[in-house]
Image (cartoon, grey):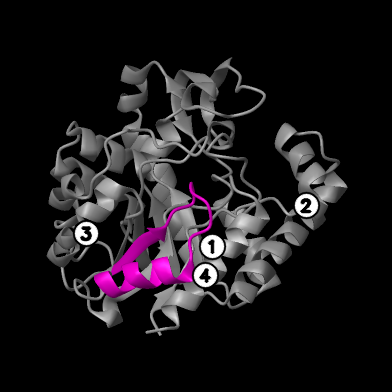
């Protein structure tokens, strides 16, 4: 069977929705935090495993929608503009001013999340961490944020080393901003490769990157969608990462699918075929796409996955898409 995996985030379980919203606002009583986060992770893991995926994740339910939680983990910043009451477009996100060098003395939250989630299910092996550009994405002014890039890389690297020390067997670096800037042509491939290599330096785990063009309000950051622009970057990752997860769900990306042949043979390919922004696909449609991909990538190197996390979708959509993805993969 072709292997299947997920990206990370999962819809809020209905029974914990109110408590989680209180947690994100910082008003949930301290005695309820751990049972809420643990209980929500239990639901997410159970639902993913019931869908039959080869590899499940913890759901990232400790992290607020999108990446709003990241700047709140940083020192050296202060709030400039609060986030909108409801995140619908990319201009709704909060903004923070840099007042001194940034740090994350208590981490970004992913280590604590994995520690809780692996106690729920010791078979949990994969965890994701946002990339350094994601850590900086809410910080202003942009020039000062760029100057903090080395510190952001250090923060991410510390988080991943701690996860590996806890027993995470696969660590995924989520890098949509590298993907976006690569498609725009304003990030040299060598610079992108260096960011990834430095983020993973000294990390003893399977190293995976996840490239997508964003998902907020069911919209990408860009209206231009392709894979070809990522290839000069991806082709230089041999020996640095073990798996490359590429969003393949937009028509422009799917049209470029032949370039998957050009990915180094020492890396596995995770194809983000299942579009988290669209209605639930049919099993036959997913099957046809897998069949096409098998003409480009050897089955032992191929994984099938959603294009992004399901954290901004309903549970019904997430389970429907994941179940049909697994059904399609079982046909091979």
Distance between the Cα atoms at labels 4 and 2? 22 Å
Q: In which quarter of the image is the N terminus?
A: bottom left
Numbered tag placed on residue 304 in the rendering: none
Neighbours of disc 3 within 10 Å: few (<14), some (14-19), many (20+):
some
What residue do we see at 54% from left, 62% from top? Answer: 321
The answer to whether marks 3 and 2 mark residues whose Cβ atoms lie closer than 8 Å is no
Which residue is disc 4 drawn over?
Answer: 324
Question: Residue beneath label 3, please?
Answer: 257
Please give the residue where the numbered disc 1 appears in the rendered image.
321
Q: Distance between the residues labelled 3 and 1?
A: 21 Å
Residue in the foreground of this view, choosing between 314 and 195: 314
Look at the image and say whether residue 281 sits in the magenta stretch: yes
Disc 2 target residue: 14
Residue 236: percent from the left, percent from the top? 14, 56
- Closer to the N terminus: mark 3 or mark 1? 3
Instruction: Please tell me whether mark 3 or mark 2 is closer to you in this view.
Output: 3
Q: Tell me how far mark 1 sits from mark 4, CA to CA.
A: 5 Å
Task: Please report whichever mark, 1 or 2, sits nearer to the chain's N-terminal start.
Answer: 2
Q: Position of residue 291 (x, y in %)?
A: 29, 75
Distance from Cα at disc 4 to Cα at disc 3: 21 Å
Marks 3 and 2, the one that precedes in the sequence:
2
Q: Is mark 1 on a helix, strand or loop?
A: helix
Viewer-side residue, 306 vs 166: 306
| Residue 78, above or below 69 | above
Of tags 4 and 2, the one toward the viewer is 4
Q: Residue 215: percent from the left, percent from the top?
A: 46, 41
């Amino acid at each position: 069977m072709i292997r299947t995996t997920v990206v990370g985030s999962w819809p809020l379980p209905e029974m914990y929705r109110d408590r989680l919203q209180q947690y994100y606002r910082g008003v949930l009583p301290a005695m309820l935090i751990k049972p809420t986060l643990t209980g929500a992770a239990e639901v997410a893991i159970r639902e993913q495993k019931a869908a039959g995926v080869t590899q499940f994740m913890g759901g990232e339910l400790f992290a607020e929608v999108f990446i709003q939680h990241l700047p709140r983990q940083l020192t050296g910043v202060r709030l400039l503009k609060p986030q909108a009451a409801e995140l619908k477009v990319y201009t709704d996100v909060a903004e923070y001013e840099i007042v001194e060098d940034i740090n994350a003395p208590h981490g970004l939250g992913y280590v604590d999340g994995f520690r809780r989630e692996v106690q729920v299910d010791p078979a949990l092996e994969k965890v994701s961490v946002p990339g350094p550009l994601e850590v900086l994405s809410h910080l202003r002014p942009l020039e000062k944020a760029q100057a903090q890039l080395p510190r952001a890389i250090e923060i991410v690297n510390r988080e991943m080393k701690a996860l590996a020390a806890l027993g995470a067997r696969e660590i995924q670096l989520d890098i949509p901003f590298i993907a976006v800037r690569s498609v725009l042509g304003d990030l040299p491939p060598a610079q992108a490769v260096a960011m990834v290599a430095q983020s993973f330096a000294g990390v003893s785990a399977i190293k995976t990157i996840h490239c997508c063009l964003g998902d907020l309000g069911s919209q990408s950051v860009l209206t231009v969608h392709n894979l070809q622009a990522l290839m000069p970057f991806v082709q230089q990752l041999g020996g640095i990462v073990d798996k490359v997860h590429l969003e393949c769900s937009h028509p422009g990306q799917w049209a470029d699918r032949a370039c998957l042949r050009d990915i180094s043979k020492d890396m596995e390919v995770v194809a983000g075929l299942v579009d988290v922004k669209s209605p639930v696909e049919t099993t036959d449609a997913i099957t046809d796409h897998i069949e096409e991909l098998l003409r480009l990538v050897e089955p032992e190197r191929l994984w099938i996955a959603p294009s992004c996390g399901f954290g901004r979708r309903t549970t019904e959509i997430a389970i429907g898409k994941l179940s049909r993805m697994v059904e399609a993969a079982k046909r091979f």
